[in-house]
Amino acid sequence: HSDLHRTSKITMEANKKFQAFAAYEAKGEIKDFSYVPISLKPDEVELRVESCGVCHSDLHQVHNDWGGANYPLVPGHEIVGTVEKIGAEVKELKVGMRVGVGPQTGSCESCHDCGRGEEQLCSAKIKSYNTATGDSQQPYTYGGFSKRLRVRAKWAFPIPEEIPSEYAGPLLCAGITTWTPFVHNKVRSGQKVGICGFGGLGHMAVQFAAKMGCKTYVITRSPNKKKEAEKFGATGFIVSADEKQMHSHARSFDFLLSTISGDGVVYEDFFKLLRPDGIFCCVGLPPKISFKPNLLVVNRLTFCGSYLASHSEIKNMLQFCAKHKVLPQIETLKMTAENANKALERVAKNSVRYRMVLVNN
């Protein structure tokens, strides 16, 4: 009798559907969606999703702007949830713990980059959604626009108690994206740092630079953002269209971080701001970038990019944010299909200040 009971319980488990929200086609509306998840693996945890941030890249994926999107597509990679089940091999997480999951949920663990602890550069990385699973009932990974989620425990990061759940999600994308460039490029206290562009990424970058002790400037086309920039810790403000202002800071910056994703930027104007051996680092994704290399060559400048963060850097960033009270500015909506569409629409219009978060319950 108990065996029968156990078998029926396992069958129920196997067919239990997860409720989520998905786009069913490119540029399609987000609608209700349910799926039978792949059974919990020994190195995985099951989360009850508390909240999920809405990122510009979610919009690109829903619209298939970059190609390669697979539908139904459940977006969301700024996920915070509570651990409800743990696989047999999971040691570091316990039921009831609050964890965060970002855009990356796995890597091959055998390549050169994984070997040197830079898992975010692995060419076979697993993403929180739209990565093929090889399973017929759940053919792709599904993201955080959902009630529940299964994910490898290694990529679920304990959230320090000082950080409220709805604020933690954006740290796992906008946070790590702007944290890593400072760490990797060895930016230090006392250096003069400029943040180019001031939105979802920029308002995080300003806080990191300021709390690291840098002389922190915001460089933007929008003169009306000065008060906001100062609120987040900027000590200086430069309107990029004002030639006189730009000229007065020529050859004075150690490091510029570009969060700009728009077109039509004259990169040479930014290069003029850097002192010799200065660094210009891109985390924004404009459709394309072009510039004359002269200033780069004669002033021995570095032009580089940065992507996500390694496993250890994500942990370090969360500790830094808890200690220095670095949090995104957010707007929240209850997580429903209708609100997911509203949130993506707001992101498309660039009217969010500065990160949108969908909240369950």
Image (spheres, rainbow, N blue to C red):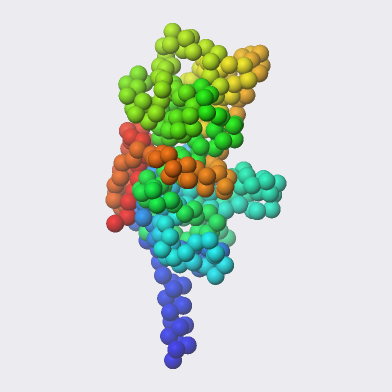
Q: Position of residue 299 (x, y in %)?
A: 64, 15
In the rendered image, the quadrant that contains the N terminus is bottom left
Q: Answer above or below: position of 2 versus 133.
A: below
Q: Answer above or below: position of 303 versus 320.
A: above
Residue 195 horizontal side relative to residue 342, left or right: right
Q: Which of these two is toward me, 324 or 65? A: 324
Q: Position of residue 164 (x, y in %)?
A: 36, 49
Q: Which of these two is toward me, 319 or 80? A: 319
Q: Answer above or below: position of 115 versus 215.
A: below
In the rendered image, the quadrant that contains the C terminus is bottom left
Q: Which of these two is toward me, 88 or 15? A: 88
Please tell me which residue is depicted at 43% across the width and 26% down the height of the picture.
Answer: 197
Q: Position of residue 291 (x, y in %)?
A: 58, 18
**Can the viewer see residue 8 in this picture?**
yes
Q: Position of residue 35 (x, y in %)?
A: 42, 63
Residue 268 horizontal side relative to residue 71, left or right: right
Please tell me which residue is depicted at 44% across the width and 8% down the height of the picture.
Answer: 244
Number of residue marks: 0
